[in-house]
Amino acid sequence: MSLLGKVRAIFGRSRETLAAVQTLGRARKPIDAAFWEELEEILLQADFGVPTTEKIIGGLRTVARQEAWRTSDQAIARFRKDVQRFLTLPHPELNLTRKPSVVLVVGVNGSGKTTTIGKLAASLHAQGKRVLLVAADTFRAASAEQLAIWGERSNAEVVRGREGADPSSVVFDGIAAGKARGVDVIFIDTAGRLQTKSNLMEELRKMRRVIERETGEPPAETLLVLDGTTGQNAVSQARLFNEATALTGVVMTKLDSTAKGGVLPAVVDALEIPIKFVGLGESIEALRPFDPAEFIDALFEDAPESATA
Ligand SMILES: Nc1nc2c(ncn2[C@@H]2O[C@H](COP(=O)(O)OP(=O)(O)OP(=O)(O)O)[C@@H](O)[C@H]2O)c(=O)[nH]1
Ligand SMILES: [Mg+2]
């Protein structure tokens, strides 16, 4: 199967919910109250969430009135374009122009931070960059070990701190080592934390301040790693991590599991920060730059015709 085909197959799992949108379009139903209700129901099921669903449907209803649409296929064609436009924000690629560029990686427990760093490090190494991984997760000894394994796989260097050390001191050491060695990119791996624990969020602010002080600038990138299968809680995570750390991008992982597609537009709508990468599996190559057009095509393409019969 081609890589694009594979991406389609993977994203396509979200279709189990979103295929219903396609079916609704194909049915060429009259555009009436029942139609809008049905569309709303489907979007809520697909994890778009209430605010994003209302925004999308509100916009569609206005255009439907203005352009005197008669049947659902017209509304659904426009819906597809609207969602793609929604997902398209400026600067979807990593901004790594400084030397060194510091990338701070944050998120809740188990969202995929360490794995994503490993995958990104491998891809940057392949592009000829010298990469350093900093294990600022000093909470568990096993996590520095896990990062070290990713360092070996991706040909990146690793700096770790003592177990229980202040994460900010490890960040300080990591940046000093990165500067001394002349690396291009420094990834800071942080411990997973609940977005509602204010002391842990304060710890992230402190790491951010150390980065600013030691490099003269905020992190080149602050990436929030979200588990795509967590549904609407991802929106709360996005908001609170953004308040604490001024995010520049989101990585949505585990889209190969049973993620519902709507969480991507919901997060982008809440933050107005681009999704930069999507995780499509556990292996080193299973990370892709996020392409809204590809995502939308995958969601809607090959939706089973038979569903309308
Ligand atoms: N299926 C799938 N699994 C993933 C993906 N990304 C990460 N994982 C798995 O999710 C689990 C947690 O990943 P980690 O990278 O350890 O997550 P973390 O955010 O660093 O976790 P903590 O440091 O404990 O907070 C591991 O088993 C990974 O292999 C993905 O895109 N797809
Ligand atoms: Mg980790």
Image: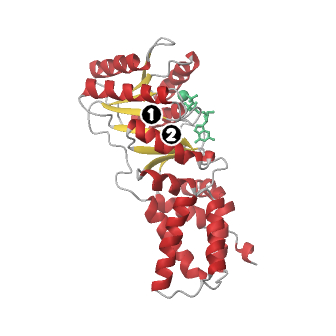
Q: Which mark is residue 105?
A: 1
Helix, strand or loop for disc 1: strand
Residue at 55%, 34% (x, y): give it.
Answer: 108
Q: Nearest the camera: 156 or 50?
A: 50
Q: Secondary structure at mark 2?
A: strand
Question: Quick check: marks 1 and 2 in contact, CB under 8 Å?
Answer: yes
* Amino acid on which disc 1 is placed: Val
Q: Residue at x 61, y 49 (%)?
A: 231
- Quick check: is the Cβ at mark 2 less than 8 Å away from ligand 1? yes
Left or right, residue 98 beside residue 308:
left
Quadrant containing the C terminus is bottom right
**Residue 38: where, in percent of width, then height?**
66, 72
Total marks shown come to 2
Toward the left, the furthest residue is 216
Tell me where residue 171 appears, x and y as whole percent: 38, 21
Residue 150: mark in rendering: none
- The answer to whether residue 157 is above or below residue 226 is above
Furthest residue toward top: 162
Q: Give percent across and percent down for residue 64.
A: 50, 82
140 or 287: nearer the viewer: 140
- Residue drawn at point x = 44 percent, y = 33 percent: 105
Question: Mark 2 is on which residue type?
Answer: Val
Residue beneath disc 2: 225
Where's residue 18, x and y in %?
A: 64, 64
